[in-house]
């Protein structure tokens, strides 16, 4: 469920992914949401949710978030780690979110 606290919205995004709660995930995203990540761009809320529900390479991952940064203008960055089901780190990441009036407009993922 959306909240007015942008950092809480970011955390809710990852909880929805990790809990496979795709209705909650969709509720956080604007209809024109775009996810740009290494090697893949997903355009549209429905396409993103479909990918996360049915096509992501490993659905049994978790996303512990180490910090959330905010620029004051609607952009937030989350620094975290993608962990496999056994707890092993797959990659570290920074996701940069653009928050609009209708929810997250985009997220750009940077990994190492």
Image (spheres, rainbow, N blue to C red):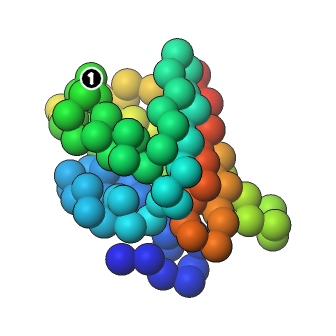
Choose top left, top right, bottom left or bottom right for residue 53.
top left
Q: Is residue 21 visible?
A: yes
Task: Look at 35% across and 59% down and name the residue there.
Answer: 25
Q: Position of residue 7 (x, y in %)?
A: 57, 69
- Estimate the x, y position of residue 52 in percent, counting from the top left: 30, 39
Q: Nearer the viewer, residue 51 or 69?
A: 51
- The residue that label 1 is drawn on is 57
Question: Which residue is drawn at the image coordinates 45% and 39% (left, top)?
Answer: 81
Instruction: Using the image as rendered, state which of residue 12 and residue 64 is in the foreground.
Output: 12
Q: Residue at x 73, y 58 (%)?
A: 75
Q: What residue sits 36% from the left and 59% below the top?
A: 26
| Left or right of 81, for residue 53 | left
Callout 1 secondary element: loop
In this orientation, does residue 87 appear?
no
Is residue 11 left or right of 36 when viewed as pictured? left
- Give the class, few, some or many, for how many residues have Cα within 10 Å of label 1's Cα (few <14, many ≥20): few
Q: Nearer the viewer, residue 89 or 95?
A: 95
User: Which corner quadrant holds the N terminus?
Assistant: bottom left
Instruction: Pick the quarter of the image with the C terminus.
Output: top right
* 110 vs 80: above or below: above
In x, y percent, where is residue 4? Answer: 56, 83
């Amino acid at each position: 469920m959306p909240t007015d606290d942008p950092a809480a919205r970011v955390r809710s995004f990852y909880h929805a992914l990790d809990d496979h709660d795709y209705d909650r995930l969709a509720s956080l995203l604007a209809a024109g949401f775009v996810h740009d990540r290494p090697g893949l761009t997903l355009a549209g809320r429905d396409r993103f949710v479909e990918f996360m529900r049915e096509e992501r390479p490993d659905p049994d991952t978790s996303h512990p978030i180490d910090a959330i940064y905010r620029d004051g203008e609607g952009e937030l960055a989350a620094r975290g780690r993608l962990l496999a089901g056994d707890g092993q780190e797959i990659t570290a990441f920074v996701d940069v979110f653009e928050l609009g009036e209708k929810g997250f407009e985009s997220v750009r993922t940077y990994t190492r």
